[in-house]
Amino acid sequence: MKNKFLIIDNGSTKALNLRKKIESLVPSDWEYNENDYEYVLVIGGDGTFLRNKNMYYDKKVVAINGGNLGYYSYFDSKNLKSIFSKINNDNLFFSPLEIFVETNNNSYSCINELLIRSNKVLNANVFINNVLLEKFKGTGLMICTPLGSTAHAKNAGGAILDPNLDIIQFIEIEPLTQKKYSSLKSPLVLKFDNKIVLKSKSNSNNFIILDGETIEEKFDNNLSISFNYAKFKLFKPDCKKRYLKKLRDSFVEDK
């Protein structure tokens, strides 16, 4: 029985060249199939990976770096020759954490981060496991997974989280400082089995942004946030040296 796979690319010249190389490497016991597939090979950057997540349900996903550094990817133009032999090993796949959001009787999910933002002032009571943490006032609030910690969350002052840990991060965006008011003003790292609830009065100036995409739903009253493993598996060998090299190449400059 053949292993069936689908290829998704972002249309760039680099991605298309990688696709041609992959197609030339397909072994006899593998078959390309757009309708019935077990593996999804995604060629592009992290944005390409996130935009196509609706194709991943119950699949094994393999990210190939056809963009810049690609934190979701293990493969690039240098190590493609081994792709089909490596991804045939189920032990090298894992289920990443996913953020689940419920508001106004609708539910959503994201992989990197959830951002609640206001173009005026966001007022929200923050509860963790039914315990009031703070009455937040500021520009916004962000919750991110370890895989999302090197993206928007880092620019917002969050910590970089080890992608092998089952933890999430709560970050305040531009909190207000007043004489009679102060919030946590520090990133809070929590185990993934915690539940966060935000309560706010109806406000048309509040926006919900999931993995960089603003949804039409407005945040008014209650927003419930929980975490669990995604309904797909990602090829991501525990390669600490490779991850640290990506961090260095992304953010560190020696003079």
Image (spheres, rainbow, N blue to C red):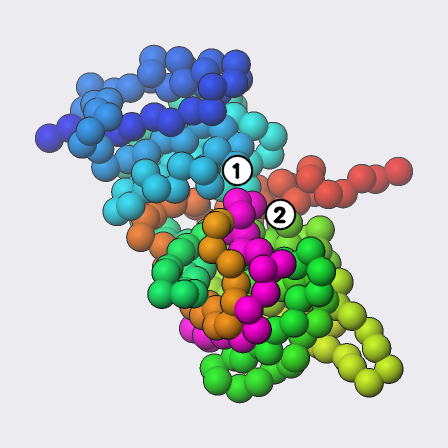
- The residues colored magenta run 190-214
Give yes or no for residue 52 being in the magenta stretch.
no
From what the image shows, is residue 42 above or below residue 97? above
Dots 1 and 2: beta carbons under 8 Å? yes
Q: Which amino acid type corresponds to the residue marked 2 in the rendered image? A: Ala
Relative depth, front residue between 90 and 170: 170
Q: Residue at x 53, y 47 (%)?
A: 214
Relative depth, front residue between 51 and 224: 224
The dot on residue 46 is 1
Q: Which amino acid type corresponds to the residue marked 1 in the rendered image? A: Asp
Residue 49 lies, in percent from the top left, at 46, 37
* Left or right relative to 89: residue 74: right
Residue 122 lies, in percent from the top left, at 66, 66
Residue tagged by mark 2?
Answer: 151
Q: Residue at x 52, y 18 (%)?
A: 12
Residue 160 lies, in percent from the top left, at 64, 56
From what the image shows, is residue 180 above or below residue 66? below
* Left or right relative to 228: residue 209: right
Residue 131 visible in the snapshot:
yes
Q: Residue at x 50, y 72 (%)?
A: 221
